[in-house]
Image (cartoon, grey):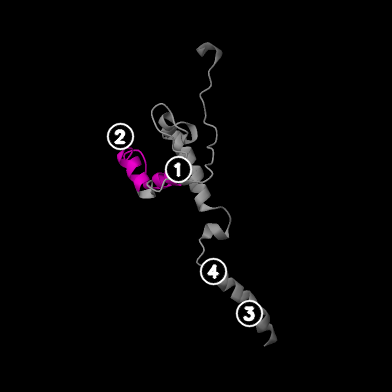
Amino acid sequence: MVQNYRIFPCIAALLVVCLMPAPAHALFGGSKKKKEEKAGALLFRDKGCAHCHGVAGVGGKKGPTLTSIRKDKTWTPSHMSDQILNGGKKMPPFSDSVTDDELAQLIAYLRAKHKPAPPPGTEPQTTAAQR
């Protein structure tokens, strides 16, 4: 009977961990939000967003700066989603080239307080013969 009382705290702790409403990524390391922001940074580069909006969204000749978009209350996630998918003003629509997951990642990146830098892109190497 005494041995059962020793096991009870272990079982109770296990039940608390298993029944907690926390998502798995919070329990086992890594933040889903941070992963989405990093994936969004990569997409921002690879989908060509930086071509118009500049590296890290600082603005360019074709597109406005996106660095303060997270502070602008008019740019809700829904508004950002609509802009990316349907375009507007001079921005073309990207509904055919981004998935729902990619859209969420791009929005996470744009709304990030500290925007992660994407890993360096792979530039094609030029040989002496190509120069």
Could you tell me the amino acid type at mark 1?
A: Leu
Q: Nearer the viewer, residue 70 or 41?
A: 70
- Asked whether the beta carbons under mark 4 and mark 1 sit within 8 Å of each other, the answer is no
Looking at the image, residue 114 sits to the left or right of residue 94; the answer is right
- Is 86 in the magenta? yes
Q: Nearer the viewer, residue 21 or 82?
A: 82
Give the residue pinned by disc 4. 18
Label 4, secondary structure: give it. Answer: helix
Looking at the image, residue 123 sits to the left or right of residue 89; the answer is right
Q: CA distance from mark 1 to mark 3?
A: 47 Å
Q: Residue at x 50, y 51 (%)?
A: 33
Q: Earlier in the sequence, mark 1 or mark 3?
A: 3
Q: Picture coordinates of residue 115 (x, y %)?
A: 52, 42
Q: Earlier in the sequence, mark 1 or mark 2?
A: 2
Could you tell me the amino acid type at mark 3?
A: Phe
Q: Nearer the viewer, residue 4 or 97?
A: 97
Label 2, secondary structure: give it. Answer: loop
Could you tell me the amino acid type at mark 2?
A: Lys
Q: Earlier in the sequence, mark 4 or mark 1?
A: 4
Q: Picture coordinates of residue 81 (x, y %)?
A: 35, 45
Give the residue pinned by disc 1. 110
Magenta residues, start to end: 79-108
Looking at the image, residue 49 sits to the left or right of residue 26; the answer is left
Q: CA distance from mark 2 to mark 4?
A: 50 Å
Instruction: Write down the quadrant of residue 66 in the picture.
Output: top left
Q: Residue at x 41, y 26 (%)?
A: 61
